[in-house]
Image (cartoon, helix red, strand yellow):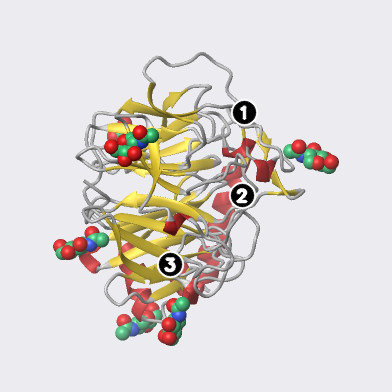
Amino acid sequence: MKTMSIMNLKCVFFAVAFLFRPVALQSYNGPEDSRLNVEVVLDVPTTGASTTPDGRIFFVLARVDGSTGPQLVEYHPSNKSTTAYPNEEWNSYSEDKDPATHFLGVNSQRVGPDGNLWVVDKGATSFGTPVNLPHGPKVVIVDLKSNEVHRTYPMGNATRAASLLDDIRFHNSTGKAYLTDAGSAGLIVLDLVSGSAVRVLDGDLSTREYMPVSAEGRIVYTQGKPWYVSADQLEVSPDGTYFYYQPSSGGMSRIETQWLDQAFYNSSLDSNAILGQYVEPYAFTTPTGGTAIDADGNIYNSDVDSQRIIKISPNGTMTTLIQDPRLLWVDAMWIDASQRLWMPAAQLNRGEPFNNGTSKIVKPNYVYSLNIGVGPSPIDHA
Ligand SMILES: *[C@@H]1O[C@H](CO)[C@@H](O)[C@H](O)[C@H]1NC(C)=O
Ligand SMILES: *[C@@H]1O[C@H](CO)[C@@H](O)[C@H](O)[C@H]1NC(C)=O
Ligand SMILES: *[C@@H]1O[C@H](CO)[C@@H](O)[C@H](O)[C@H]1NC(C)=O
Ligand SMILES: *[C@@H]1O[C@H](CO)[C@@H](O)[C@H](O)[C@H]1NC(C)=O
Ligand SMILES: *[C@@H]1O[C@H](CO)[C@@H](O)[C@H](O)[C@H]1NC(C)=O
Ligand SMILES: *[C@@H]1O[C@H](CO)[C@@H](O)[C@H](O)[C@H]1NC(C)=O
């Protein structure tokens, strides 16, 4: 009974919040903001940047513009060029090659708190194609000193044909990492020592999308249907207490990491009726391309409908950090050691999969940055 009433309360919260959501949800055509710096110019869109404190830069290239080539690259500021990372072979998948040792579809990448590069491979070669099970979906760690693959975590046992293994965050003091599944709604808890992975909050209200994604003021369509994206953005609070997550349509929830960690071992806890009780609505965010978290626990959330970055304080209050017409579908953001927020303007909604096979992405593609006066959360990266 208690569970039912909490489920109902959550439904009521989302329904009421939806009715009273702010009306500023439309494409933004206002003036440019001179605080925005152009950090990198690319000839293809990137859906995620990451950097090391000594200045190395990595990008994931989603190829939604119809271009071909490596999905994961290192960018060289000295000559403004990119090279396949960790090498050409990992980036050269074709059906005759081993899906366990090649990237099928890199969805995200990040320099982890251990100083290695963590790569999330959704295990499918394009949006909407079934996952290549069991060996396609995986998390690959590349050692940035040797530039070689250090370990691969197979995720085939925790994913499904409809999964979209999305992104990863860490809770190193308990030796766990958390991933979102944006295709088959749910979270995955990964034990970094054993490599075992367990699905939790599978199909829970908090991991499910309740609306398709909207960008530049319009619902996004793919293959003739509105595009629904389940649990996507995720962050861990700097003290490791909370795990924040949301579907791409917005509506951010949080749960204490202790419950996720316990659910990994205790399958009695791993039912939505029980684990769902510990989920709290956190912030009523708008359709989102990506997030980042700073050392003070503020979450930066890119509003893809209105070309702005929303800052969510640890108490859940949202304010606009910057709004600029150039911030077109800012995807996974990054805070570097020089206190700059990197904003890759991916224009994802203008890509081929969302425009009947014709890319409307305007080249070149920009990665912007903004000084935010605070560095990254050490639990996330240096
Ligand atoms: C750019 O510089 C990097 C690093 O020095 C090098 O590996 C790469 O080959 C260079 N690319 C071009 C096109 O010169
Ligand atoms: C976690 O911490 C241990 C010990 O401090 C370290 O060896 C390991 O590399 C860390 N892992 C990650 C993912 O940060
Ligand atoms: C799935 O789990 C089984 C049983 O633990 C294990 O033998 C197998 O290697 C796992 N497969 C993958 C792809 O993780
Ligand atoms: C497992 O979870 C159930 C449900 O919350 C709880 O009653 C039980 O005490 C837990 N078991 C352990 C060993 O933590
Ligand atoms: C939430 O935090 C912000 C930033 O620290 C502060 O300005 C605001 O007053 C706080 N709101 C509440 C309701 O505590
Ligand atoms: C895609 O094609 C359909 C049918 O021709 C059309 O109704 C729709 O507006 C097109 N969508 C986009 C995003 O161009």
Q: What is the C-alpha distance between the residues marked 3 and 2?
A: 45 Å
85 lies above or below 295:
below
> Badge 3: how crowded within 10 Å, few (<14), some, or many (20+)?
some
Q: Which residue is mark 2?
A: 15
User: Are the residues at dot 1 and dot 2 in contact (C-beta closer than 8 Å)?
Assistant: no
Label 3 SS: loop
Give the residue type at disc 2.
Ala
User: Are the residues at dot 1 and dot 3 in contact (C-beta closer than 8 Å)?
Assistant: no
Q: Nearer the viewer, residue 67 or 371?
A: 67
Which residue shows up at 65% across the image and 48% down it?
212
Q: Which residue is mark 3?
A: 101
Residue 225 is left or right of residue 208, and the answer is right
Q: What is the C-alpha distance between the residues marked 1 and 2?
A: 20 Å
Instruction: Select label 3 or label 2 by which is in front.
Output: 3
Quadrant in the picture for residue 119: bottom left
Quarter of the displayed picture in which ligand 4 can be seen: bottom left
Residue 291 place in picture, x, y as percent: 41, 43
Q: Earlier in the sequence, mark 1 or mark 2?
A: 2
Residue 326 visible to the viewer: yes
